[in-house]
Amino acid sequence: MAPRQIKLPAKDDSEKDVEEVFSQRKRPESGRYLLQVDRQTKGSYKTSEAAQSAALEIKTAFPVVQVSVYDSVDNTNTVVEPPAAS
């Protein structure tokens, strides 16, 4: 019986330009302030104001969950409270 030869398609150089794909275990951290919902990191922000506004939107939509902003440089955690009802 003759050995079989398998021809593979030629590789493109465009695959080298593809960025690293992040999975659930490894996420990029581009900002200093991390938005956490029930102790799970959901996003990162470069400014405290952006993180606080995103946290406040989540807290007003879902008042039961615990929302906090973690400062990765100062190692402080700020819990976001819902706005007071008028």
Image (cartoon, grey):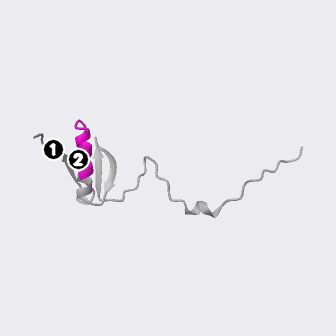
Q: How far apart are marks 2 and 1 (CA)?
A: 8 Å
**What is the x, y in percent for residue 73?**
26, 60
Check the image and report above or below for 62 versus 21.
Answer: above
Identity, as a three-letter code, of the amino acid under mark 1: Pro
Image point (83%, 48%), residue name: 4
Residue at the limit of the structure toward the front, as seen here: 86
Reading the image, the residue beneath label 2 is: 56
Task: Residue 67: say if magenta.
Answer: yes
Kindly indicate the quadrant of the structure image that contains residue 9.
bottom right
Quarter of the image with the C terminus in it:
top left
Identity, as a three-letter code, of the amino acid under mark 2: Leu
Check the image and report above or below for 10 versus 25.
Answer: below
Mark identifier at residue 36: none
Magenta stretch in the rendered image: 53-71
**What is the x, y in percent for residue 20?**
50, 57
Task: Residue 43: say if magenta.
Answer: no
**What is the x, y in percent for residue 61?**
26, 40
Reading the image, the residue beneath label 1 is: 83
